Amino acid sequence: MDQREKLLEQLTGVDSSKLNYYVELKKRNQEVLKQNGRLEILHQLSRDINIDMSIADIVERAFANLPQALPCDFLGLVAIKSSGLILKALMPRDFCRIDDFPAHSPSLKVIQEKKADIFNLPPEELSHILINPAYPGPLRSLAITPMFKRDEVIGALIVGSAKAECYDEADLSFVQHLTDQLSISIQNARLYKQVSRAKDEWESTFMAVTDPIMLIDTDYNVLLHNGRLPAEMQDFWNKALGRKCFAKLHGRTEPCPDCPIQEVQRSGQPVYQRWQTESGLVLDLSYYPVFTEDRLLSAVTIILKDVTEKIKMEGRLVQTAKLAALGEMAAGVAHELNSPMTVIIGTAQLVARELQEAGQPEQAEELDDIVNSGLRCKRIIQNLLTFSRQDQQPATEIDLNAEARLVLGMIKYQINRSQITITEHLTEDLPRLSANGPQIQQVLTNFLINARDALTEVERQEKTIEIATELQIKNGQRFAVLSVTDNGIGIQPENLAKIFTPFYTSKEATKGTGLGLSVSLGIAESHNGTIEVASTPDQGSTFALILPIDQA
Amino acid sequence: MNISKFVAPEIIFGRGSLSQLGESVIRIGASKVFLVSDAGVIKAGWVDQAVHYLHAAGLETEIFSSLTTNPKDCEVTEGARRYRESGCDGIVAVGGGSPTDVAKAIAILATNGGVLQDYEGINRISHPLPPMVIAPSTAGAGSEVSQFAIIVDTARKLKMSIISKSLVPDIAIVDPELVQTMDSKLAAATGIDAFTHGVESYVSLAATPLTDIHALKAINLASRNLRQAVSNRHDMEANTNMSMASLTAGLAFSNAILGATHAMTHQVDGLIDQHHGETNAAILPFVMEYNLSACPEKFRDIAEAMGENITGLSVMAAAERAVVAVRQLISDIGLAKGLGNLGLAAEFIPLLSENALKDACLVTNPRAASREDIEGIFRKCM
């Protein structure tokens, strides 16, 4: 057909028609539908991929959705490693192996040029892709898109099909979108892992500390705590409504006066405080400021250190030191007094004998009083000497009643002077037990002095102190009990817990040290024993030293 | 050729048929209309009337009339910009060949983009055009039914023929009322244009029985009504018949294509700004003489359709009567002027001839023509 006829046919011929809008619309519509479908897949994928998924899981999820959008027999994620490229994840998981990416490999080209591309290569060009014979191969069409992390290429996504020439530019653009989506998902997962690892590390550090730690915001809300609060303090903690620190720690409804948080806020410096709880614990609190980026106080970290035991120890040390000094002095004084007393007694006896021989027995009897008083002084001096040597004395088999009498002998006179009647109910056949005698004397002395002090503050017709010893059997174990009961002022129940706390005292500053009972409890505990207190306000108290007879 | 195709729009014909405009536009799915017209038609009041019908149907309008006789590519570019900016979704042309061709060209750019030169030639359009209704205000161009749009390329100084079945509008509303506002000179020029379409499509190599009927009818109606229509602009019978002549000629040439006359006038029109009808009148008789020997029977039919008495004449003699009759018609309506008189300088003839050889219309001319042949005809036409 010559040129002219061809032109003629074009001008009039059947090949050309008025273009139909419906056809155009249908074509557009199909394109839009296809595009919509693809967007839906991307959307579905972004919903399917969880933040804690591994890269392999993410690729698997993408592979599951892909065939709806385009032909896909293989989906692979190639990553850049220092030495070259590696096939990081693939679907199906056993589809192929790529041990080495040669210089001509399409993935390398895409990554180097940072540009997505379609490859329709003969199988020999792709011989580095070692396909599992269980799958139909080889791959004839590849759509490969670079995976970006910001502007940097971190790898490539390969979509492959065994069908020849099955991808077009629209498919490639879709794969690029998919790659971008996957890149975001992978970055997110990676960030999530980093953050959660750091969080775990901090949490375990926080939880590992055995002292209670809490983080409190400037509005007194407890943000975090490590659950190490001592059992004695859990009551308020558990009962508190809301999470205000004053409610949880103190059972208050408003902030504590002089709350250290105020000072931390003012000074921006850590603040330290000692706090004695209702239950008798002594806590050292450290308030450390936590600042925001612009140096504003955002929270306060509080570390509570239970120093009750440490304080007791300190108290005991002080008391021991004092007693040691006292003992030294007493020994010196006793020694000095011993000679004059011997002279007094000896001389009085001599004079008394001379008066007897001179036939003046009345005068002689008066001198006997001097002799007796002198002898009593000598006994007191002897006791003081014994007491002062307590530290050197190891535990020996002692008779509790004998110890009690020894103490009474020393201080009965003092107590009787205060119009107090002392009665003794000593159980006579008490077994002997292994103990440090002088220390037991110290405890009893302490009980007696406390009882006397409790009685001096009360107006009563008959002030009595009863000393008793008895044998108790609990759970098949034998205990010797030495108790002192008075009918003095008693102890208020809320103070009962505090009385063993070092430096706690109800007495005037000149009279008490606040150490007596804490040292006594220390002594009892060092004998594997304990001290029991029963008290009714305005009626009296009983302090009992309970010591095991059979040492384990 | 064993297979032929005849493409025509829906045609609404008759006095007062412009009233169908609003309903027609709604039917093809437009809601805001880009109305292309020119200053003359606006002055005659037809645009106001068209807008009235469009608004009555609840349609919005945007009027574009910045165009000239022998419309230019730059006018089309501006129109397409206005079309896109105004958010229109349909095109209406009210006017002669110029607004109609501009409307078609704007429609091309509206959905296909690019520049007009991209679509020059045959079947270059790839996307359907917006819905289009054309109401001619002249009786001659036939563009309301044709697959042609002719636009001047101002850079190359020639008329670009854009030929595509997609250029056939959806609906043509031919209301003879509109043509009565033409002056006599325009009536003569447009009338002879319609007549030329009839002659050229009848002798075209691509003519089919379906186009022949329309071509002969157009020749017959024009030769019997053009003189009256020119001399009495209010003769509504002549106006109506000339409208039908233009319509049938349009259907004929749109499907059978034209010949050497148009291949040559397209070149002249690109160079001198004269009405296409006047250049047609200057060239047609000489091209008929040149083609006579290729298809004398067809020219005999033309003579007969023009009412010449050919009884007893040989085929050739009868065919020659057609040329004589055409010369007489042209002379009677006052268009017997040479190309020289119309302002063409002889020095351009070689260039024009060269370009005419490339014109699509030459393909269907019944007698093959070389550059020298075309040059010869041009010189005769001077």
Image: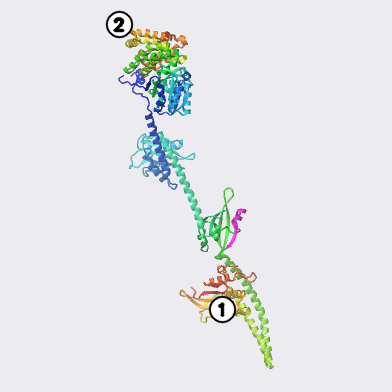
Mark 2 crowdedness (10 Å alpha carbons): few <14, some 14-19, many ≥20: few
Image spot of residue A191 (x, y percent): 48, 46
Which label belongs to residue B312? 2
The secondary element bearing badge 2 is classed as: loop
Q: Residue furthest bottom?
A: A359
The secondary element bearing badge 1 is classed as: strand
* Residue A251, image quadrant: bottom right
User: Tag 2: residue type?
Assistant: Gly
Tag 1 and tag 2, C-beta contact below 8 Å: no
> In this rendering, which labeled residue sits more in front, label 1 or label 2?
2
Q: Nearer the viewer, residue A157 or B292?
A: B292
- Tell me, yes or no, whether dots 1 and 2 are on the same chain: no
- Indicate the chain on which mark 1 is placed: A
Q: Is residue A384 magenta?
A: no
Bounds of the magenta segment: A257-275
* Residue B28, image quadrant: top left
Q: Nearer the viewer, residue B321 or A215?
A: B321
Q: Nearer the viewer, residue B334 or B70?
A: B334
* Residue B24, image quadrant: top left
- Indicate the chain on which mark 2 is placed: B
Q: Is residue A46 above or below residue A509?
A: above
Visible in this render: residue A57? Answer: yes
Q: Disc count in the image?
A: 2
Which label belongs to residue B39? none
Disc 1: which residue:
A466
Q: Is residue A270 magenta?
A: yes
B207 lies left or right of A51: left
Q: Is residue A351 above or below residue B132?
A: below
